[in-house]
Amino acid sequence: MYAITGATGNTGSVIATRLLARGKKVRVIGRDARRLGDFARKGAEAVVADVTDAAALTNAFSGAQAVYAMIPPNIGAPDISAYQERVSDAMVAAITRAGVGHVALLSSVGADKPQKTGPVVGLHNFEQKLSSITGLNALYVRAGYFMQNTLAQIGVIQNFGLLGGPLRADLAVAMIAARDIGDWSAEELLRLNFSGKQARELLGQRDLTYKEVASVIGQAIDRPTLSYSQLPPALVKPALLQAGMSTNVADLILEMSEALNSGYMAPLEPRSAQNTTPTSFETFVAEEFVPRFKEKAAVS
Ligand SMILES: NC(=O)c1ccc[n+]([C@@H]2O[C@H](COP(=O)([O-])OP(=O)(O)OC[C@H]3O[C@@H](n4cnc5c(N)ncnc54)[C@H](OP(=O)(O)O)[C@@H]3O)[C@@H](O)[C@H]2O)c1
């Protein structure tokens, strides 16, 4: 049996769906039984557990041969690092008490660094905690920058007619579709042949700059001159707060952006067939960005 945290989310839902389709026993974990209902109808066992609740997670993980672990985003947290530590402590306690043998953790490029990478420090610390569990087989899935992050540009385009953000326009970023992380992780969970503690980077189909992101989106929404401007932190921060982030989360997102811009936070592996995944940014834009863009345009 597999226990999947974040089962209604971008990556967990793909994993749960794939494992169920292969006839595996799956326990889906989330905060709301109704949101887990689709999986329950497909034969999964739905368990309501908060990721900060070690006792509820122990119950959710008991009997699982493998767990998909993640720290759900919490953009309004007044102290995101404290929240991340609470989650990783609870998960580690539950993994240990339930005697789970294999864990795939959704981590990030840059999780090799102990500091100065914003919210990715919490993933570094989670990896370290799992590494201290004797006998556990753990796979740290160090994913690149989610293509989904570009969905935040929909409002910017609609309000200002351009894309804007803290990253350098010419910075080549390994961008990945969340579904590729889910598909890849599901296959690793099905094979279960990872042992000891291993980190694997997943870098998406190719590296893209935000200049190219603007060009691909511009073609797809029929605004071929759409451009991207790097904005100073003093302009980005109010926009992040406006989007619902706490001051602390906004500051750490800016710290992470600086780490990306300077090259401090970057993949360790050269691109290869092993860390390249199939979904192109063009496909993501056609299948996810454009429908969301049109939906938002229709209501505004
Ligand atoms: N964005 C990036 O570029 C990037 C890059 C690398 C790594 N990452 C990492 O990816 C992770 C996010 O992955 P994702 O996009 O798959 O997540 P996601 O789509 O936001 O899904 C998270 C799920 O967790 C559940 N959840 C939220 N709070 C919870 C709580 N307190 N207790 C139990 N469940 C809770 C939610 O389900 P319910 O609402 O049903 O409870 C939600 O569907 C983060 O750890 C992030 O650091 C992100």
Image (cartoon, grey):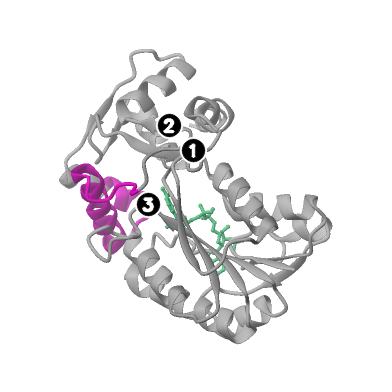
Disc 2 and disc 1 in contact, CB within 8 angstroms: yes
Q: CA distance from mark 3 to mark 2?
A: 15 Å
Q: Considering only order in the chain, which callout, 2 or 3, is on the residue closer to the N terminus?
A: 3
Mark 3 residue crowding within 10 angstroms, few (<14) / some (14–19) / many (20+)? many
Q: Is mark 3 within 8 Å of ligand 1?
A: yes
Residue 158 percent across, percent down from the top left: 39, 28
Circle 2: residue type = Arg
Q: Foreground residue, 68 or 219?
A: 68
Which residue is label 1 attached to? 276
The residue tagged with tag 1: helix, strand or loop?
loop
Residue 128 colored in magenta in the image:
no
Circle 1: residue type = Thr
Q: Considering only order in the chain, which callout, 1 or 2, is on the residue closer to the N terminus?
A: 2
Which corner quadrant holds the N terminus? bottom right
Which residue is label 3 attached to? 109
Residue 131 percent across, percent down from the top left: 44, 74
Kindly tell me whether residue 174 is visible in this rendering: yes
Label 3 vs label 1, nearer the camera: 1
Instruction: Tell me: 181 left or right of 85.
Output: right
Q: Is 274 placed above or below 247 here?
A: above
Instruction: Tell me: 5 left or right of 84.
Output: right
Mark 2 residue crowding within 10 angstroms, few (<14) / some (14–19) / many (20+)? some
Q: Which residues are magenta?
A: 239-268
Mark 1 residue crowding within 10 angstroms, few (<14) / some (14–19) / many (20+)? some
The residue tagged with tag 2: helix, strand or loop?
strand
Secondary structure that dominates the magenta span: helix
Residue 35 percent across, percent down from the top left: 68, 59
Disc 3 and disc 1 in contact, CB within 8 angstroms: no
Circle 3: residue type = Val
Which residue is label 2 attached to? 206
Q: Considering only order in the chain, which callout, 1 or 3, is on the residue closer to the N terminus?
A: 3
Which quadrant of the figure has residue 28? bottom right
